[in-house]
């Protein structure tokens, strides 16, 4: 029996990259090995070192993609913005270079594409997360609608994690609707501000219930994560953890109600 082939017309695979060319190659080769292709592939590079840029240009001859470069590192926001600007298809599959799709992802992407075609109010479909979104309404085929409300009976600050930079399918007019990613900021701040903009502008999304079954996130010692987090964010000390949760609960609610983003 011939292997199943997937071609996603109308979707551009957008990959943001910075100094992890071997991780990028792994991602592209995995899609090829799974017989999965897209109408277009855009790799947006954020001023990588020359050895990585050379590797990317060598890769283009084997695994074709459009490479969007910049003269210097300008941060995650600028990298996503210029990559999204280069997309010409109705839909964008956004993935950072350290993720690896599992074989079952392709079928889930088919489902997500059909959902967005039939449900015009949908802005994005999320495929990966570190934790389950707290308020979900079952939809179909293993996906659920994310529900957000500012009212206190939707308790906890995790309800604000509605948007994420983790792998997702979105409409390519995303920047027009929710604003451009803020530039010149740390990656986690960039993501936070887009998260708030997405909620304030009433974005709608689906969430894959088995949220760590479609992708692996792999960071090797040779190409570690480029996101640096401080002690306050990572510490598991009980007092620090309690203080962090209280701070986030207060900050997220105050920012949502009294600040405007994008």
Image (cartoon, grey):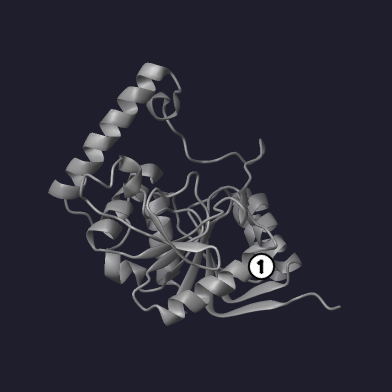
Front residue of 53/242: it is: 242
Instruction: Locate the N terminus by quadrant.
Output: bottom right
Q: Residue at x 42, y 24 (%)?
A: 231
> x and y percent of residue 155 in the render?
28, 42
Image quadrant assignment for residue 136: bottom left
Q: Reply above or below: 207 against 220.
A: below
> x and y percent of residue 16 in the render?
51, 57
Q: Residue at x 51, y 78 (%)?
A: 114
Residue carrying label 1:
60
Residue 238 is at least partly visible in this image = yes
> x and y percent of residue 179 in the render?
27, 63
> x and y percent of residue 220 in the render?
66, 39
Around disc 1, counting alpha carbons within 10 Å, would you say few (fewer than 14), some (14 to 19), or many (20 or more)?
few
Q: Report helix, strand or loop for mark 1.
A: helix
Q: Say left or right for 149 vs 216.
A: left
Front residue of 37/254: it is: 254
Front residue of 190/154: it is: 154
Q: Residue at x 32, y 53 (%)?
A: 195
User: Among all residues in the image, which is located at the extreme right?
Assistant: 1
Q: Reply above or below: 84 against 154.
A: below
Q: Residue at x 67, y 76 (%)?
A: 6
User: Among all residues in the image, which is located at the extreme left?
Assistant: 258
Q: Say left or right for 197 vs 162.
A: left
Q: Say left or right for 200 vs 205.
A: left
Q: Say left or right for 221 vs 156.
A: right
């Amino acid at each position: 029996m011939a292997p199943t082939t997937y071609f996603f017309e109308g979707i551009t695979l957008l990959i943001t990259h910075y100094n992890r060319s071997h991780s990028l190659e792994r991602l592209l080769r995995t899609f090829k090995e799974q017989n999965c292709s897209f109408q277009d592939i855009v790799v947006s590079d954020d001023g990588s070192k020359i050895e990585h840029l050379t590797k990317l240009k060598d890769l283009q001859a084997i695994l074709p993609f459009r490479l969007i470069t910049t003269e210097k590192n300008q941060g995650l926001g600028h990298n996503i913005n210029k990559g999204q600007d280069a997309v010409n298809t109705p839909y964008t599959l956004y993935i950072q270079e350290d993720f690896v799709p599992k074989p079952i992802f392709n079928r889930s992407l088919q489902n997500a594409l059909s959902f967005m075609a039939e449900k015009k109010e949908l802005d994005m479909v999320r495929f990966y997360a570190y934790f389950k979104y707290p308020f979900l309404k079952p939809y179909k085929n293993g996906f659920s609608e994310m529900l957000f409300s500012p009212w206190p009976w939707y308790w906890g600050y995790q309800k604000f994690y509605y948007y994420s930079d983790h792998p997702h399918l979105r409409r390519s007019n995303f920047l027009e609707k929710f604003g451009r990613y803020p530039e010149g900021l740390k990656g986690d701040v960039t993501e936070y501000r887009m998260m708030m903009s997405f909620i304030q502008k009433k974005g709608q999304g689906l969430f894959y219930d088995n949220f760590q079954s479609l992708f692996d996130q792999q960071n090797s010692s040779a190409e570690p994560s480029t996101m640096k987090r401080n002690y306050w964010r990572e510490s598991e000390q009980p007092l620090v953890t309690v203080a962090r949760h209280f701070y986030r609960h207060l900050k997220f609610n105050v920012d949502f109600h009294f600040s405007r983003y994008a």
